[in-house]
Image (tube, rainbow, N blue to C red):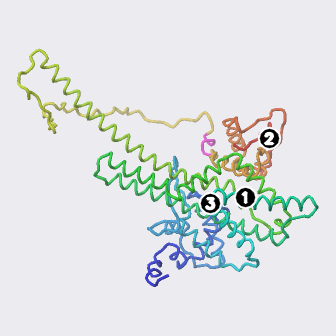
């Protein structure tokens, strides 16, 4: 913490965010839409709508404090080298998306750490330190005899515990110890999710430097690929790369996923834990980890895609040049096959060839033909149908309907269309209901239409009229 280091640190995005004029608005908004629901990214339209709602409520209290529009604020926050938000385009999408930068998340986390805590566990942390020290020493022990002696000690401790249990002695944590370890568990889980934005940023920096190297390098293809693959291997073999691959392999194991879910459910069912009023973080921890890990994997895959495109372009250009040279050689060989020259150096290849276009080779000018327009007087006709229907059409966003289904299935394995309509009342009436049916028909493997059971779905039209329809029951299941 030297003076010059702190002076340079004033340009860090974290420092700039804390010192920004609208820091209260920025940080509270980021916390509400990104951190609290643990959202990894939001589309521009959705984020703009949320910010407009926030500004509307704040202007009821602070009338002239935030004069800009929501779109202008988002542009300010996502522009420049030290932006607070990362603006990017997702694959196969024309609408930009926004995500927090690692620096912004760090500043929010630091502010959260300033909150006064009523209970700070020290015993569990000290025990964690002891366990980590013992684990490091045990796993790095190369002397078999010493390792066997340590395992014998552990075996004796386990046998003693089994003996006490057989004698009826109950060995368990008291409520204070359970709460202390649960708070430590929540803190570790939040820290793990927060670190994923930094891991993704590190992979993105590698992707960016590789693109710049491909665009500006004058090296031969082999030398350039050696450099690129060397850097990729370095990242994969680094501590961070190995740690992430080990994490991803562990998370993708079905047995580990089931074990993780079972442990979470058992812990949340404890009476001492329920008294702590846990939030939705741990029940949805697996989905949050999968989403964060998938984004890191997607960033890593884009690097491989860049290399593949570079190789395809280079191979295509080289093949084209080689085929042209071979064709010219074949034509020359056919021309002299009946009378081959006696001179040894009878042919050569030009490096360049001028493209000559003679004036006489051009086609003659042809005046454009003008359309002939009849002078008959036009009269307006009478339509045979009502054209009002053409102006009363509306659009049903199927992507939004699919997102509602996916979000509902995060908390349960299956959900009926009737339950979805109760949670999200129909806004477009029968058209929206048909769109749900279309989604069910397209995904037969995860949607079931039960023709033997009928349900009644009701809604209120735009004119305020109650409407209903009786239809087969539709059940959506988790993928």
Q: Is residue 220 above or below residue 265?
A: above
Q: Is residue 205 above or below residue 294?
A: below
Residue at the spot 57% in from the left edge and 57% down from the top edge: 243
Q: Can you identify the residue that label 3 sits on?
A: 141
- Sequence-wise, the earlier of marks 2 and 3 is 3
Query: What range is drawn magenta here?
Result: 387-391
Q: Nearer the viewer, residue 458 or 416?
A: 416
Disc 1 + disc 3, Cβ < 8 Å? no
Residue at the spot 72% in from the left edge and 65% down from the top edge: 185
- Sequence-wise, the earlier of marks 1 and 3 is 3
Q: Can you identify the residue that label 2 sits on?
A: 469
Residue 185 horizontal side relative to residue 311, left or right: right
- As measured in the structure, the alpha-carbon distance from the residue carrying label 1 to the one carrying label 3 is 12 Å
In the rendered image, residue 436, in percent from the top left (x then y), is placed at 70, 42
Q: Residue furthest front?
A: 145
Q: Residue furthest top?
A: 338
Residue at the spot 84% in from the left edge and 32% down from the top edge: 452
- As measured in the structure, the alpha-carbon distance from the residue carrying label 2 to the one carrying label 1 is 69 Å
Residue 208 horizontal side relative to residue 250, left or right: left
Q: Can you identify the residue that label 1 sits on?
A: 151
Secondary structure, mark 3, is loop
- Sequence-wise, the earlier of marks 2 and 1 is 1
């Amino acid at each position: 913490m030297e003076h010059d280091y702190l002076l340079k640190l004033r340009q860090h995005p974290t420092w700039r965010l804390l010192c920004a004029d609208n820091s209260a608005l920025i940080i509270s908004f980021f916390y509400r839409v990104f951190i609290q629901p643990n959202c990894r990214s939001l589309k521009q339209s959705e984020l703009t709508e949320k910010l407009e709602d926030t500004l509307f409520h704040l202007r009821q209290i602070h009338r002239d404090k935030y004069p800009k529009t929501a779109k202008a604020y988002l542009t300010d926050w996502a522009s420049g080298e030290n932006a607070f938000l990362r603006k990017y385009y997702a694959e196969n999408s024309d609408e930009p998306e926004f995500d927090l930068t690692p620096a912004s998340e760090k500043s929010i986390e630091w502010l959260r750490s300033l909150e006064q805590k009523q209970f700070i566990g020290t015993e569990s942390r000290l025990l964690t330190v002891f366990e980590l020290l013992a684990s490091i020493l045990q796993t790095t022990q190369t002397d078999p005899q010493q390792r066997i002696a340590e395992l014998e000690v552990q075996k004796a401790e386990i046998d003693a515990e089994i003996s006490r249990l057989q004698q009826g002695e109950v060995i368990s944590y008291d409520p204070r110890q359970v709460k202390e370890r649960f708070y430590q568990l929540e803190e570790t889980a939040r820290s793990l999710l927060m670190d994923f934005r930094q891991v993704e940023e590190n992979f993105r920096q590698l992707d960016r430097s590789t693109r710049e190297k491909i665009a500006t390098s004058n090296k031969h293809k082999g030398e350039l690929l050696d450099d690129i693959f060397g850097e990729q291997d370095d990242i994969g073999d680094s501590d961070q790369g190995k740690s992430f691959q080990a994490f991803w392999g562990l998370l993708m194991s079905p047995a580990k996923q089931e074990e993780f879910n079972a442990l979470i459910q058992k812990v949340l069912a404890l009476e001492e834990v329920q008294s702590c009023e846990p939030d939705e973080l741990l029940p949805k921890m697996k989905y949050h980890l999968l989403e964060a890990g998938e984004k890191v994997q997607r960033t890593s895959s884009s690097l491989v895609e860049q290399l593949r495109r570079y190789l395809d372009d280079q191979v295509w250009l080289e093949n084209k040049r080689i085929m042209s040279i071979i064709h010219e050689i074949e034509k020359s060989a056919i021309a002299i096959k009946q009378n081959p020259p006696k001179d040894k150096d009878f042919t050569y290849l030009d490096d360049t060839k001028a493209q000559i276009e003679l004036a006489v080779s051009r086609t003659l000018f042809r005046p454009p033909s003008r359309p002939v327009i009849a002078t008959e007087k036009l009269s307006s006709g009478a339509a045979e149908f009502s054209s009002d229907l053409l102006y009363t059409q509306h659009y049903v966003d199927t992507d939004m309907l699919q997102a509602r289904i996916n979000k509902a299935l995060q908390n349960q394995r299956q959900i009926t269309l009737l339950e979805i309509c109760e949670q999200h009342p129909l806004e477009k009436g029968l058209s929206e209901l048909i769109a749900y049916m279309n989604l069910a028909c397209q995904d037969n493997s995860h949607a079931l239409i039960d023709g033997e059971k009928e349900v009644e779905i009701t809604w209120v039209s735009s004119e305020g009229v109650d409407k209903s329809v009786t239809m087969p029951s539709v059940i959506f299941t988790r993928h």
